Structure formats: C-alpha cells, structure tokens
Amino acid sequence: MRHLFTAIAVLITAALGAQTTNPDTVCVNASGVEYFVNKTTGSTYSWSLSGGGTIATVQDTLISVDWGPTVGTDSVYVVETNSFGCVGDTVALGVTREPMPVADAGNDTIIGYCSTSSVQIGPSTVDPTMTYTWSPAAGLSNPNVPNPVANPTTTTTYVLTVSSPYGCSTTDTITVTVDPAPIADAGTDQVICNGQSVQIDGSMSSGTNLTYSWNGSNGFTSTAVSPTVNPNDTTVYTLVVTDEYGCTDTNTVTVSVVPDVVADAGVNDTICEGDTHMLTGSASNQTSVVWSTSGDGAFVNGTSMTPEYTPGPLDIANGTVTLTITANGIAPCGQDTDDIILIIHPKPVTSPIFNY
C-alpha cells in the first residue's frame, strides 16, 4: 500500500497567535506520516495526538505518526514555548483516516487458446470514485477500466490496483488460464477392398470436452468419434474437432478402395487324345496367377495367363479334366478363381486290315 505523506507547515508568531490549517487526509494504517512546523530560533515544541494513532518519532519541529486501522477524524497538536518561556496557543491539524478501497479482480478462470475465446474480468460492483488499473496490459481490451475483456495467448496472472482519490490503494489478482489448443487426429490412412467397411478413428484427438464432425468427399457426414465407412471409391475424410471454448482444429484421413480381382479361365474346349491345349485366361486387378488341374496333366508356364496343358493318363481315361486359374488380388484383397472343362476325345481304334 502506498502511504500518503503530508507536510504541513504551521507558522506560529506572537503577533498572529495560534492558527489551524486545513485538515489532512490519510489512509487507515498509514505509517510514518510526517508533520512539521517552521522552526523559531530558541523555541521548543511539544507534540500530541487526540487519538487514532501513535507518534512514532519526534525531532523537535518534525514528528512521524503511525495511524490506526479505524476510519475517523483526529488531530495532531503542537505547542511552542519560546526562549522567554512564553507558551503559545495550541495549534491543531485535523486528520481524517479514509478506508482502504476494495480490490476484487474476480475469480480465476479458464479460456481457450483461439482468438475467439475471451473472458471479462474485474469486480461485480464498481465504485465510480475509484481509479482502476490492470497489469500487465497484454491481452486486455483496456488496462484502465474496471472490467476489461481478457484474451491472453498464454496463461497470465493480472494484478488489479484500485486507488481512492486520497491516494489509498490496494490490489488483487486473477489468473486467466489458457487451455491448450485442440489437436485433431483422424488416424492413419487405410486401404480396403471394394465392398468392405472400415472404421475411421478420431479418438487420438486431444482437447477439452471435444465434439467431432466428419465430412467425406463423397458426401458422408457423422458426429461420432470413430464412425464406420464403406466408400465405393477412394475417399478423403476430414475431421473437425471443437473444444468447449469454441476452438477448432482439422485433420484428414484417406480411405483407398482397391478394385476387386477378377479371374477368367476362358471357355470350355475339346481336344483329342495326344493333343495339348493352349489356355487363354485373363485376370484384372491381380498381382499374380497360377493354374491348377483336377487331373494328372502338366502345365508349361503355369503362372502365365496362357500356359500350355498336356493331359495325363488319368485325364485321358476320364475323358475330361477341370482346369482352374487363381488370381491373387492387390492387398488387402483376396483371390478369385475361374475354371474351364477340357473334354478329351479318345483316338479311334482301327481294326486290323484283312484280305479276302
């Protein structure tokens, strides 16, 4: 608290007699307040108080007073005795003790990191006779009003100083905590097969009391934390998280859709015993193919689309064999198969040649 120090000069002369100056004003509990009179050579001075305080020090024409904690008006008295032993009239100075102003900075509070998050601070009741000053000024709409709007970028403790017209002042503090900015985390990119579903996950986002909003490039929307999606094509999903203070952040995740693998072994065919068969298979969206047989024949280049198949003895005996192409899809998709039936006609058995 700033103490008010008042210097009042009281001139006492024999011609004029005693005179009283205008009253003084101090704050309650003011200490070391000095009062003095002009020195007359050869004179001595006797000081006293009517109450409300105590004389701390006396140095002839100068005293210091420690005033008490109560509001009221009292007097400082001085009596001069000159070198002839003549005693002058008592000179009095009225001193009014004013109450300390009340500083109420408000309750500590929390705001969000974003520029739209702010809070009004200061007292609920304002005394228009008082002067209000805030420090630091950073983040305040006006540091010289009772109730500024606070929007600091980092957690800040503000000090409110309230001063009365008499110079009495007191302080109070309020801490405005700035919550960290929310961070949106839409998860890692994913790959699915056509027709599959997958869960996209925003649960790793951080912030206070978050709400979630998903929007897909295919028109998908959701307010779930981790919704399930089943796009037909590769789709980008945007996650917007909003904290309780209205601050937002965004992040995206891409769900890539891999087309289905399709295998085609060709058309059924017929060969004769002893012949080989050139297959005409095909496949789309595949990484590799392999041919297999239900019989005992053999393939040449059995991992190509068009291998050559030679029927085995069992194939010939059965007169038919099923040939299957298996195509492996692009990860994470699986396989697709297709087959043809190859009919094997036996060679004719010609009778011996006879003569007549």
Image (cartoon, rainbow, N blue to C red):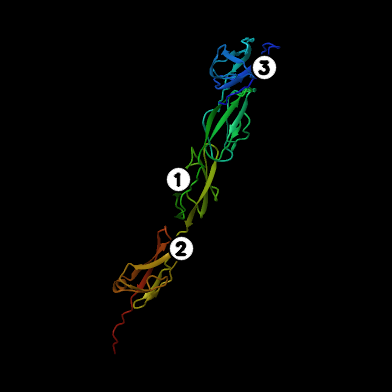
The Cα atoms of the two marked residues, 3 and 2, are separated by: 112 Å
| Secondary structure beneath label 2 | loop
For this rendering, which residue is in front, 61 or 283? 61
For the point 65% across and 16% down, which residue is it?
Answer: 23
Q: Residue furthest front?
A: 84
For this rendering, which residue is in front, 293 or 110? 110
The Cα atoms of the two marked residues, 1 and 3, are separated by: 81 Å
The residue that label 3 is drawn on is 11
Identify the image quadrant of the C terminus.
bottom left
| Secondary structure beneath label 3 | loop
Task: Give the mark nearer the N terminus: 1 vs 3.
Answer: 3
Determine whether 195 is above or below 139 in the image: below
Q: Are marks 1 and 3 in contact (CB under 8 Å)?
A: no
Determine whether 127 is above or below 219 in the image: above
Q: Residues within 10 Å of mark 2 (few under 14, many from 20)?
A: some
Report whether residue 70 is seen: yes
- In the visual, does 24 lie left or right of 206? right
Task: Give the mark nearer the N terminus: 1 vs 2.
Answer: 1
Residue 285, numbered label = 2
The residue that label 1 is drawn on is 204
The Cα atoms of the two marked residues, 1 and 2, are separated by: 34 Å
Residue 269 appears in which quarter of the rendering?
bottom left
| Secondary structure beneath label 1 | loop
Which of pointers 1 and 2 indicates the residue nearer the eye?
1
- In the visual, does 336 lie left or right of 134? left
Q: Amino acid at mark 3?
A: Leu
Residue 16 appears in which quarter of the rendering?
top right
Task: Give the mark nearer the N terminus: 3 vs 2.
Answer: 3
Q: Position of residue 41 (x, y in %)?
A: 64, 18
Q: Position of residue 165 (x, y in %)?
A: 64, 23
Q: Amino acid at mark 2?
A: Asn
Q: Amino acid at mark 1?
A: Met
